[in-house]
């Protein structure tokens, strides 16, 4: 080894020592950053666990709501089926009532005819007399109205 080589090795040793001094704080910073990263990971893991718990709660609630909705849908379907049955029965009842009304109308007509045939002629005369009196009163009012109009329109 020559003297130049020794100097070079000292120079290299000095450089290594200086680098060591610089690396030391960097190692400390790396350890600190590693520690912060570890805390950050733990915090994120806790947040993810909280989020997963919340999502599980939402799933549980959603499942309960889905079950309730399915039950309500089933009840609605049953009610609709029952309603359709009632509507069909009401249609049948309406048809029967229509037939009964027609029969009653025929019976009313027959009853009216029988009633008319059973009346005596004196009842007919009484009605005719009453009608004559009414017509007389009406004719008197009509004459008064006619005179009033002639008087008003003639002016």
Image (cartoon, helix red, strand yellow):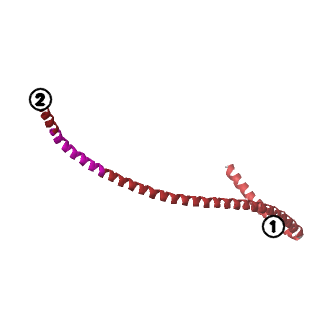
Q: Residue at x 63, y 58 (%)?
A: 77
Callout 1: few (<14), some (14-19), or many (20+) C-alpha neighbours within 10 Å?
Answer: few
Image-quadrant location for residue 99:
bottom right
**Disc 1 to disc 2: CB gap under 8 Å:** no
- Residue interval drawn in magenta: 17-38
**In the figure, residue 15 lies in which quadrant?**
top left
Q: Residues within 10 Å of mark 2 (few under 14, many from 20)?
A: few
Residue nearer the viewer, 108 or 22: 22
Q: Residue furthest front?
A: 1
* 62 vs 29, nearest the viewer: 29
**Of the image marks 1 and 2, the number of the one nearer the N terminus:** 2
Residue 32's tag is: none
Q: Secondary structure at mark 1?
A: helix
Q: Position of residue 131 (x, y in %)?
A: 81, 64
C-alpha span from label 1 to label 2? 164 Å
In magenta stretch: residue 20: yes
Overall secondary structure of the magenta section:
helix
Give the structural element (helix, strand or loop) at label 2: loop
Q: Nearer the viewer, mark 1 or mark 2?
A: 2
* Residue at numbered disc 1: 130
Residue 13 on image: x %, y %: 14, 37
Q: Where 17 falls versus 84 (above or below)? A: above
* Residue 60 belongs to the span the image colors magenta: no
Q: Residue at (73%, 62%) from the top-left corner? A: 89
* Residue 5 vertical placement versus 117 (above, below): above
Residue hosting label 2: 2
Q: Quadrant of the N terminus?
A: top left
Residue at image location 87% in from the left, 67% down from the top: 116
How many numbered marks have been drawn onto this rendered protein structure? Answer: 2
Q: Residue at x 80, y 65 (%)?
A: 133
In this image, 145 relative to 14: left or right?
Answer: right
Q: Nearer the viewer, residue 132 or 109?
A: 109
């Amino acid at each position: 080894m020559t003297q130049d080589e020794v100097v070079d090795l000292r120079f290299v040793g000095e450089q290594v020592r200086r680098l060591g001094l610089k690396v030391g704080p960097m190692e400390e910073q790396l350890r600190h950053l590693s520690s912060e990263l570890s805390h950050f990971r733990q915090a994120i893991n806790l947040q993810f666990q909280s989020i997963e718990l919340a999502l599980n709660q939402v799933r549980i609630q959603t499942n309960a709501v889905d079950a309730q909705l399915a039950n309500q849908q089933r009840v609605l379907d049953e009610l609709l089926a029952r309603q359709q049955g009632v509507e069909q029965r009401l249609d049948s009842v309406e048809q029967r009532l229509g037939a009964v009304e027609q029969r009653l109308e025929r019976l009313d007509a027959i009853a009216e005819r029988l009633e008319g045939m059973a009346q005596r002629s004196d009842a007919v005369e009484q009605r005719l007399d009453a009608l004559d009196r009414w017509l007389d009163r009406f004719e008197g009012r009509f004459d008064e109205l006619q005179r009033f109009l002639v008087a008003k329109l003639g002016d």
